[in-house]
Image (cartoon, helix red, strand yellow):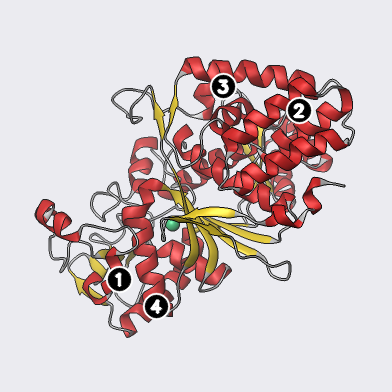
Amino acid sequence: MMAKSSSSQKDILLYNTASRSLERLDWSEYRPVTIYTCGPTVYGEQHIGNYRTFVFEDVLVRLLKFLGIPLQRVMNITDVGHLTSDADSGEDKLEVGAQRDGITAWEVAKRYTEHFEADMRLLGVVWPDALVRATDTIDAQIGLIKALEEKGYTYIITDGVYFDTAKYPQYRDFAKLDVAGLDAGSRVEMGEKRNITDFALWKFSTEPGKRHMEWESPWGLGFPGWHIECSAIIKETLGNTIDIHCGGVDHIQVHHTNEVAQSEAAHGEILARIWMHGEFLLVDGGKMSKSLGNIYTLANLKAKGITAPAFRLFLARAHYRSKLNFTWEEAQIAQKQYDTLAAKALESAPQQSDIADQYIARAVAALAHDLNTAQVLAIGLEASKELEGGARTYALETIFTTLLGIHFSPGEVEEIPEQVQELARLRDQAREKGDWSTADTLRTKIESYGYDILDTKNESRIVKKVL
Ligand SMILES: [Zn+2]
């Protein structure tokens, strides 16, 4: 009997940040488990720390899918409003990116959304059911701010519309914030705000026309605060209350606390039943930083011979709630381990076997216990030693690829239809000949299939379009 049909294994325990405890996921085969995952801010290339979060979320999705649990997962693309400080000060990161790259904020958003998507393809993640740009939901964000205004949660100061956290007494509960400590430490940042924890819902354009991204609103020309997009997108796509909300630990204190306040104040219902947060990826024992020059991207890893699936193998070593330290030495060890596993997995065609199913059942049980990937990895390595031939391939493909998202054959990651690949080849030929109008027509055709072309210096890559 296949491991996946055992009902006891469909008990999933997840650590809920909101309650600080392990909780059983309440699911039913009659309605999808709704999952929202905070996405990238597309002002530059995402680094490997960002991908650690997106990979842990992918493992969660893979577990549910393997167990046949229906799910609906939405991710946002932050393409406006995220300021250089998470706490509403500084400049909009997209506008900063525009100055840096010498293009418009809209072009910056497009460029780095494509980078992000190409990376996610390399990592072999299960694509979210919807990937929603913040700039496509401005009306919904304005609607939510209006609802908060009608309920008396907002006030207006010189630079924007703010959420009054004093009117939402539960504000500090989620992150167990020491508001008194914040008050004492940050008085200088208060400005005209009434409380140190108050945050912007809508920011005014100080010099109309200077920003690339601004919209009309009932309060004047401007742009949304960073946090409101997630609350609005969740409401629009998944409803008032969702089952699981994920993100990085750095979001607990400000971004997620603010999401909870806005959504729950507006709707009078809890925003998410379970909150899951992935820990930081350290580099050489410390935080990644520009000054140390160690903010690595997948391209940096590739240049040193570390492939995306080997990086995922490296990530699987640690529990998502533990800090993990990246060093080149350890990454190279993971790469070697991956190469050995891939060679074994590709040796024979997969063949179901009862002994292999026992390994798989153990791996599923480990994953169902708050995503214990380190244990899954150990079980997978044991299976690779103890099993042989088709049974071994079957166990490795199920444990590593299906559950952990570590693909062994590179072709599996990109599932681009043959017609699209053919159109891309024709477009390359047209470009070589300098026939730009044919190249543009072909690009439009490719887009009609839901794909796009990312032209870089040396190659044209096919990427899936944002929904
Ligand atoms: Zn968010």
Tell me if 105 is positioned left or right of 25 in this view: left
Q: Which residue is mark 3?
A: 302
Q: Is residue 269 above or below residue 15?
A: below
What residue do we see at 56% from left, 16% from top? 333
Q: Distance between the Cα atoms at labels 3 and 2?
A: 16 Å
What's the amino acid at mark 2?
Ser
Residue 182 in view: yes
Determine whether the residue tagged by mark 4 lies in a helix, strand or loop. Answer: helix
Q: Which residue is mark 4?
A: 266
Q: Which residue is mark 2?
A: 409
Q: Which residue is mark 1?
A: 170
Residue 285: quarter of image: top left
Q: Distance between the Cα atoms at labels 1 and 4?
A: 14 Å
What's the amino acid at mark 1?
Gln
Q: Earlier in the sequence, mark 1 or mark 3?
A: 1
Q: Position of residue 398 (x, y in %)?
A: 76, 37
User: Any atom of ligand 1 within 8 Å of the CB at mark 4?
Assistant: no
Tell me if 130 is positioned left or right of 442 in this view: left
Determine whether the residue tagged by mark 3 lies in a helix, strand or loop. Answer: helix
Q: Residues within 10 Å of mark 3 (few under 14, many from 20)?
A: few
Q: Position of residue 434 (x, y in %)?
A: 67, 30
Callout 1 touching callout 4 (CB < 8 Å): no
Q: Distance between the Cα atoms at labels 2 and 4?
A: 48 Å
Q: Distance between the Cα atoms at labels 2 and 1?
A: 50 Å
Towards the viewer: 30 or 466: 30
Of badges 1 and 3, nearer the viewer stands 1
Q: Distance between the Cα atoms at labels 4 and 3?
A: 45 Å
Q: Is residue 310 above or below residue 223?
A: above
